[in-house]
Amino acid sequence: MKIIALISCGTDDSYHSPLVQSFIEKCAENDCRVLWFQSLSSNSDDTAHNKGELNIFNLINYEIIDAVVILSLTVLLSDVKDSVIKKAGEHNIPIISIDGYIAGAYNISLGYVDALEEMVRHVITKHGAKNIKFLGGSKGNEESDARENIFRKVMAEYNLEVTDDNVDYGYFWWSAAADAVQRHYDKFGSMPDAFVCANDSMAVGVCGKLNELGFNVPDDVIVTGIDGIPEGNTYFPSITTLMLDINSAGTTAANRVMQILNGDIAVEGSEKVEGTILYRESCGCEPARLSSDDNELKHDLYGRIDLWNGFSDSLITMSEAVTNSSSFEETLENIKPFLSSAWTKECWLCICDNFITDVTRIEDISNSSQNYQRFGYTKIMKHVIRGLNDCEFDTLEPFESSELVPNFKKVMEKYNNIMFLPINFRDRTIGYFALEFTRTMRNYHILRSLLHNISRVLENARIQSELKSVVNRLEDMYIHDSMTSLYNRRGFYQLVPKIYNRCRSNQTRFMVLSVDLDNLKGINDTYGHSEGDAAITTIADALLSVSDGEEIIIARFGGDEYIAAGACPCENYSADFMKKFQEFIDNYNAASGKPYTVSASRGIYSLVPPLDTSLDEFIKSADELMYYEKATHRKHHGYSRGRM
């Protein structure tokens, strides 16, 4: 079994779906599996979101790849293509390029160059056009520049001048092309004889804007396209174009991959898949469309509208569900049902293991965004959700990202392809979505919208999780002593009154131990404050070592003052507590090697609380016992009490 990596960008149903489907099916006939890495953005700019989407190509595991196929026309940023080419070269992996030239690769062209040349000749010789404007994709784009050069070449052959006013760019999109028409009209107040467009989508935009400005196509202005999308055939006027043999391109690419891997043909080569030029209404020739084409497109459009309506309703439902989520895990549970919009037999939502981090310090919330995954994917992917047949969902164990999906070998035995799509928030990587690509996957744009919404839901859940951690940390800091980690006075009075009132109501025994560290001032003055701090924490450790369960609350009330209070599980509990406390202190002093002895004055008060006695009165009784012992210690040892 051979593994092929397929690289592409964008969401063009009329281009990607038939080409990729025919490629995958032909590969499957030869026991070859396809891993399709797809950025859903057009990658024509350098925005943060675009960078995040393009990170999907860093997921490719070249150790398991036998060949790379690039849909070069869709990969508009050279950095992406160059990176894939470089890594494939480092692993001696052959490259097949469809619709764009790559040095050292096997290049399959789709006949655009010859078709465009014939198209320009046609509007000149057949229709007498002399003032012709070319609308390219984007300046600097390899394919767009190649088409512009053909236009300039043919115009020169007929001695027709090409100035800057004869060339503009519509970025392969109808609205941008319409803007180019408006720019021309604003400058000249008139139109050229013809617009030659680098694709049909721009041709449709040109026709629409011309009609809006009061110009008739083709009587006033001729318009041509070049890639044969269905909308160009059913638009009025129908667009003169090149009808590409997309299915043949996919099949041809699969055959060449097999031949290269079998050593039947050279790794480097080229060939052309021919298309058919259709001269339609937009250039003034005989219309070529059939009424059946209109009906088919209408049926398709109604189906798409129905899909979008249902999908929009599901997004509203998902938004309501995740809004009520109380944790990140609950958010994931609420996302599961909406993965069914992918229309696939099996899918996997995989999240980087550093996406959700524990924020234990306030400053961590700002640092967490700096440590966010931006390049590649973490070694381990977790929070893995698997969807089966659009209705069953489960959570899988974490796995290594180099494996791409859990149980990769078994998955490859089951399916002939897996598609990988990015999940990111701006340039921050969240994870990726993997699924089997089938003919039932109805709409790329729905899939793209689904993943964009999921990415925003996950990012919001991450932020809420970190904020919750910070709030918990602030609450914890509010009720705890920073030096000893004991409760402070606020924490004590937040917890102990409930225990005391329960003991008083139930008439069960309650205990208060008042402790005061002896000679803290003397330790500080003689040995330094660091030793004073050590003595303070020693008393805290002693109290913590004795307390058990949540019924005994230990607090530091001041510099050298402590209180332990809570319900007594048995009558002798308070005496045992005091004994164990003193044993800890004695053991510490015996082993510490310190030039001073840690000791404490104590007062313990333990009985069933009288119904008319408050907690503070109970504590006062323990304090009085502690002060009595403190006075005795001063008398015998001659040191001052020494407050901090």
Image (cartoon, rainbow, N blue to C red):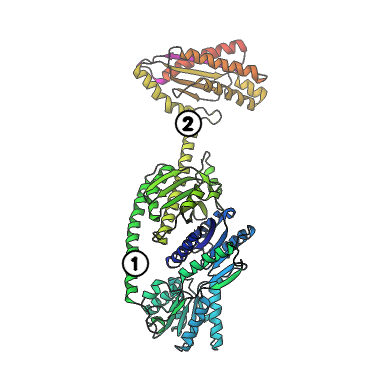
Q: Is residue 603 magenta?
A: yes
* Pointer 1 residue: 301
Q: Residue 432 location in percent, x, y?
A: 49, 52
- Identify the residue at horizontal 32%, vertical 76% (top origin): 291
Dot 2, crowdedness within 10 Å: few (<14), some or many (≥20)? many
Left or right, residue 266 beside residue 579? right
Q: Is residue 594 above or below residue 295?
A: above
Helix, strand, or loop for circle 2? helix
Q: Nearer the viewer, residue 526 or 179?
A: 179
Q: Residue 264 location in percent, x, y?
A: 59, 66
**Region rendered in magenta:** 598-615
Q: Nearer the viewer, residue 91 or 172?
A: 91
- Residues tagged 1 and 2 counted as in contact (Cβ below 8 A): no
Amino acid type assigned to the residue bearing label 1 in the image: Leu
Q: Nearer the viewer, residue 406 or 196?
A: 406
Left or right, residue 316 beside residue 558? left
Q: Residue 258 location in percent, x, y?
A: 55, 63
Q: Can you tell which of label 1 and label 2 is closer to the viewer?
A: 1
Q: Is residue 504 above or below residue 217?
A: above
* Pointer 2 residue: 479
Q: Is residue 607 magenta?
A: yes
Number of numbered discs present?
2
Dot 1, crowdedness within 10 Å: few (<14), some or many (≥20)? few
Q: Is residue 605 visible?
A: yes
Amino acid type assigned to the residue bearing label 2 in the image: Ile
- Identify the residue at horizontal 35%, vertical 63% (top origin): 304
Q: Is residue 458 above or below residue 257?
A: above
Q: Residue 542 location in percent, x, y?
A: 55, 21
